[in-house]
DNA sequence: TTGTATGCGTTATCAG
DNA sequence: CTGATAACGCATACAA
């Protein structure tokens, strides 16, 4: 592949002049520029970003550490990140951690070696020592969706605790007393906060908390299926289930369906996060829809600010989820299938800087 | 950040010795190695991949050009690519082309600048001149899912034509005579081949082809909705619809649902590609499930062979899709929600090398 | 307006 | 077993 020197020779100038033409800095006579451009064209010259990065200390590359692109929530986040990154001439390296701290660590190492300009990460655990490593090395970092203990860093997320408390309060208002919850793993802030919201709502309403109605497990369909099966087998089963993410909700749905449980008559299901077609499958569902695409976009904006930018305080951006009640906004429910509409939504930040 | 020289100084050796320790090449006395390792640890030294790449001409980075991660099919492909890449110490840059040749071109440029070791791409059009550019520059390339005209290069895909012909033949055998098809854009091989299969099946069975029953548009939900609306409005509407991808099927499903069309009594729907929960929404659906995860894995294997490897003939790997009939294999239908099962499936190649 | 010298961090080559 | 030197491709600082 042609180098800057090849181009320089062909255009009968020095390499630096070629560099000036490419980067459009410094004065170059029009005639010279033309010769250079012709040489570039003739040789199919493409600047070597590796060499460039070595000097400029900019790789124009971001890393996105999420649990699993296969989850529509993260897929949409990834799409938001990629769109915003591309808009700013950054590439995105995709990293699936599967909520596995070891994998996360491996990716952190890759990130350091590759000298990416910044990282957007959903921690596999709120301890995640390796992510702290990034901060120590002064790699720009933005957390997304999940918190990290005792680390003052930019973060974009939705209000989990209050939202889930409101969700449960409203179930209680509808007359439900035996409400089950199926939450995610320990040490993941979203799982903890959604569960805590559940507890607070029951306490406020004076409804006793029955440990048998509280289930936890990986954020997977299997957890939903298994837990729902167990809940249905209770001598005094719940009348409502709060699934803490979409995969768990799918599992619950499958099991409820299998066992012929009618919704919402025999069981009311509420959940965090969207899955396409969910509204068609179970029109009685209440869904907390997090603005995943915007979360990705905003996280990327914050990251790029950090990379290009001035020092500033860490920001915590808290977005409002939309709550889709049964029968409501049917159309919008399937919007994930086509991001066109979401993409054009202007970004609104409800940020609260802290510390 | 510490450099190899810092480490060398601290360990009182030359940089090259440090390099030898890191890369585990050449002989180094145990004592020296230990000193070096201690220095590396003390300084938190991480080798600079940029500088390394400059010499070694290996970036350990792949690019994945797909139309849209948001489509569960591509999501799953991406996951397969990422898993296999990671296994071989490669990172993956995610590129969404949205079936837009201009975007594709921009990404090709990025790919060239970044000197990625190889590219996996689903062409936005079977012309896509820019992708040819990669071949000219001798960048290892593997096509996935879609063909490119007159280009002898590795490719992984499913049998589209025969599969769709079989699908339609079976509809005819069930007594359907007015069968509609909603296919994707022009210049995309999958859209063309699936449509061609439809045509062949009708011809073979002596069923006249009615142009009013043939619709094309972008592979989106909107296309499915719009086309289905138009088909239902025909004076002599079809009794079956063949949706050529999952998004189109979703659109069709939404419109059929809205208009209260009962399936399969009033309308039989068949489709390519899976969407989670599809089976719950419409148990009467017939779905051609392409092994997306495996496609990603195999494409990556081929690419890595090219990168690391010996010259060899271009390979064309054609995989068998699974066809899920109504009511059949209910469990497997939702397997996309959790890749665990897919991931453990051993890779079987039904390859046919050509040329 | 253009060019020279130098260095980014690493590794290949050759020498000791 | 270890080291000196050069080179990868480009851009900064300075000079002309």
Image (cartoon, coloured by chain):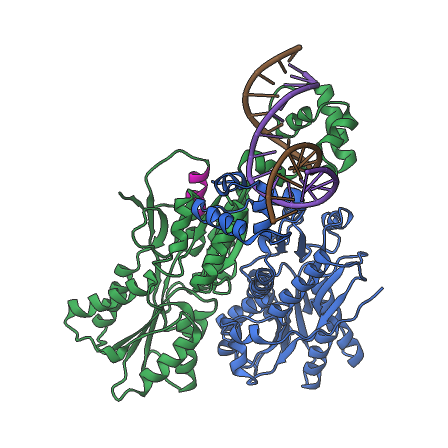
Chain colours: A green, B blue, C purple, D brown
Query: Does residue A221 lie above or below C16 as drawn?
Result: below
Quadrant into which the C terminus of chain A falls: top left
Which of these two is toward me, B275 or B257?
Answer: B275
Residue at x 17% of width, y 75% of height: A208
Query: Does residue B172 lie above or below A322 as drawn?
Result: below
The question of residue A305 being in magenta is answered with yes
Q: Position of residue B304 (x, y in %)?
A: 68, 59
Residue at x 64% of width, y 59% of height: B217
Which of these two is toward me, B23 or C16?
Answer: C16
Quarter holding residue B206: bottom right
Residue at x 50% of width, y 38% of height: B9
Q: Main SS of the magenta segment?
A: helix
The answer to whether one can see residue A191 in this image is: yes
Position of residue A35 in the picture relative to residue A107 (left or right): right
Query: Does residue B318 lie above or below A315 as drawn?
Result: below
Which of these two is toward me, B124 or B207?
Answer: B124
Quadrant into which the N terminus of chain A falls: top right
Residue, far right: B355
Quarter holding residue B4: top right
Position of residue A320 in the picture relative to residue B299 (left or right): left
Which segment did they paint magenta? Answer: A300-307
Position of residue B172 in the picture relative to residue A42 (left or right): left
Q: Position of residue B258 (x, y in %)?
A: 48, 70
Q: Position of residue A182 (x, y in %)?
A: 33, 73
The question of residue B90 being in magenta is answered with no
Position of residue C11 in the picture relative to residue B79 (left or right): right
The answer to whether one can see residue A83 in this image is: no
Q: Position of residue B211 (x, y in %)?
A: 72, 67
């Amino acid at each position: 592949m042609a180098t800057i020197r090849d181009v320089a020779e062909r255009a009968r100038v020095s390499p630096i002049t070629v560099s000036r033409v490419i980067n459009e800095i410094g004065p170059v006579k029009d005639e010279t520029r033309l010769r250079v451009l012709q040489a570039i064209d003739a040789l199919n010259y493409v600047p070597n970003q590796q060499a460039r990065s070595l000097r400029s200390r900019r790789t124009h590359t971001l890393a996105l550490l999420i649990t699993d692109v296969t989850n529509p929530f993260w897929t949409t986040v990834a799409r938001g990140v990629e769109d915003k990154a591309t808009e700013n001439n950054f590439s995105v390296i995709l990293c699936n951690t599967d909520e596995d701290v070891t994998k996360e660590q491996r990716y952190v190492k890759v990130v350091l070696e590759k000298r990416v300009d910044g990282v957007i990460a959903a921690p596999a655990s709120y301890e995640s020592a390796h992510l702290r490593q990034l901060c120590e090395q002064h790699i720009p970092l933005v957390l997304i969706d999940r918190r990290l203990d005792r680390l003052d860093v930019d973060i974009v997320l939705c209000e989990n605790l209050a939202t889930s408390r409101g969700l449960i309060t409203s179930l209680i208002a509808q007359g439900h007393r035996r409400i089950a919850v199926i939450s995610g793993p320990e040490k993941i802030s979203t799982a903890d906060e959604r569960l805590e919201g559940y507890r607070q709502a029951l306490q406020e309403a004076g409804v006793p908390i029955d440990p048998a109605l509280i289930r936890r497990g990986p954020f997977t369909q299997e957890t939903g299926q298994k837990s729902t099966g167990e809940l249905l087998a209770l001598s005094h089963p719940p009348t409502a289930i709060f699934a803490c993410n979409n995969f768990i909700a799918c599992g619950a749905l499958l099991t409820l369906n299998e066992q012929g449980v009618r919704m919402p008559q025999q069981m009311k299901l509420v959940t965090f996060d969207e899955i396409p077609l969910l509204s068609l499958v179970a029109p009685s569902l209440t869904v907390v829809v997090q603005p995943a695409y915007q979360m990705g976009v905003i996280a990327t904006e914050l990251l790029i600010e950090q990379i290009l930018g001035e020092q500033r305080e860490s920001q915590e951006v808290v977005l409002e989820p939309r709550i889709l009640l049964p029968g409501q906004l049917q159309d919008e429910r399937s919007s994930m299938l086509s991001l066109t509409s979401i993409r054009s939504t202007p970004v609104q930040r409800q940020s609260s800087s802290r510390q």
